[in-house]
Amino acid sequence: MHLNFCPRCGVPLRWQGKPVHVGPEDLRGRGVWRYQPFLPDVEPVSLGEGGTPLLPAPSKSVGARIFWKLEFLNPTGSFKDRGASVMVSALRAFGAMHVADDSSGNAGAALAAYAAQAGLRAHLFVPAYASGPKVRQIAAYGAELHRVPGPRAAATAAVQRACADNPHLIYASHNSSPYFISGIMTLAFEIAEELGWRSPDHVVVPVGGGGLLLGLFYGFALLAELGWVEKLPKIHAAQAAACAPIVRALAEGLSEPKEVEPGETIAEGARIPKPERGKEIIMALRVVEGSGVMVEEEEIQRAQSELAKQGLYVEPTAALAPAALPKLVAHGTIKPNEVVVIPLTGFGLKTS
């Protein structure tokens, strides 16, 4: 069963709550559900997600004030826990018992974990070639794995068919669910609060499906609308040169990305040749006067290694944004003494 798309135009939906009349002093608790006034009014399914440290980078060698947001310290090892917590909470409130997604990575692990916590049965459709720690993590949480032959897109088609054929199987898509995006918005709230209710000048993020970028955009936009922050930060999309549909669309002045032929990249979490929310991502980048940066494989490896020497062990996809940082500085996009936040999205132990 599909709950994530407009039935008339097929566009992914966005959840928007009622206007809230609260101030920062009204927030309670910690982590994602500290921001419950901005989230669906449901009983939380939580594993303690959110509340991750905002760590100053040890060096100002690039001239800007850099902060790492340690999202790899979430319960399943990635920022996807924010979205999974809110999405699973909403689906349980709707009476869902079986949820499905297509993922062999962080989103699949997050859905499997939060479904287990909620007492729901998770079905993960993964490419038959998928292997490694993330798939083992999904299985460990008790999710039912459906291995699908063929390319990555075949897994998406398979889960959509399964949900269309079975009204009790809910498509809990991390790429299109409006509830997943609303959970990611809490990352923007947290960053602003940790900076004393100020927006950074820039945020640099890896982009695959684009949920992280959109969650940050909508989160900062809501805070600006409420007057909690004075401005929106400029948001920059980092993609591997092997698969960069968003960056290429920006460079060509397109309103939505064309599907690209994905090459091999160690940043497998961002290897999405045609993001479902591509048009929305490009719109957001243009609103905030952001940009797109392509990075080569050796630049990703170098950034991953440099982070490890700071005591920060992240997976290659999480190194995309740090790899893009020197280019943004060299191009003059990021200027001296500006505040830059970079979410480090996934733990290094998730890769073999």
Image (spheres, rainbow, N blue to C red):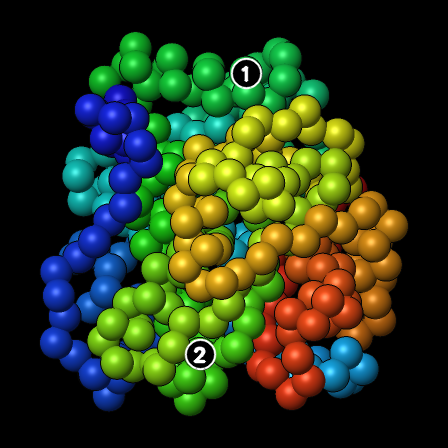
The three-letter amino acid code for the residue at tag 1 is Ala
Q: Is residue 183 left or right of residue 300?
A: left
Residue drawn at 41 percent across, 49 percent down: 283
Tell me if residue 144 can be seen.
Answer: no
Q: Quadrant of the N terminus?
A: top left
Residue 205 position, x and y percent, is: 58, 58
The kind of residue tagged 2 is: Ser
Q: Is residue 104 left or right of residue 171?
A: right
Which quarter of the rendered picture does the C terminus lie within?
top right
Answer yes or no: is residue 328 visible: yes
Which labelled disc corresponds to residue 154?
A: 1
Placement of 332 over or under 229, stated as above or below: above
Place residue 260 in its image quadrant.
Answer: top right
- What residue sits right under mark 2 in the picture? 199
Q: Residue at x 39, y 28 (%)?
A: 100
The picture places residue 308, in percent across and down from the top left corner, at: 81, 66
Residue 282 versus residue 243: which sits nearer the camera? 282
| Residue at position x 30%, y 14% in the image | 164
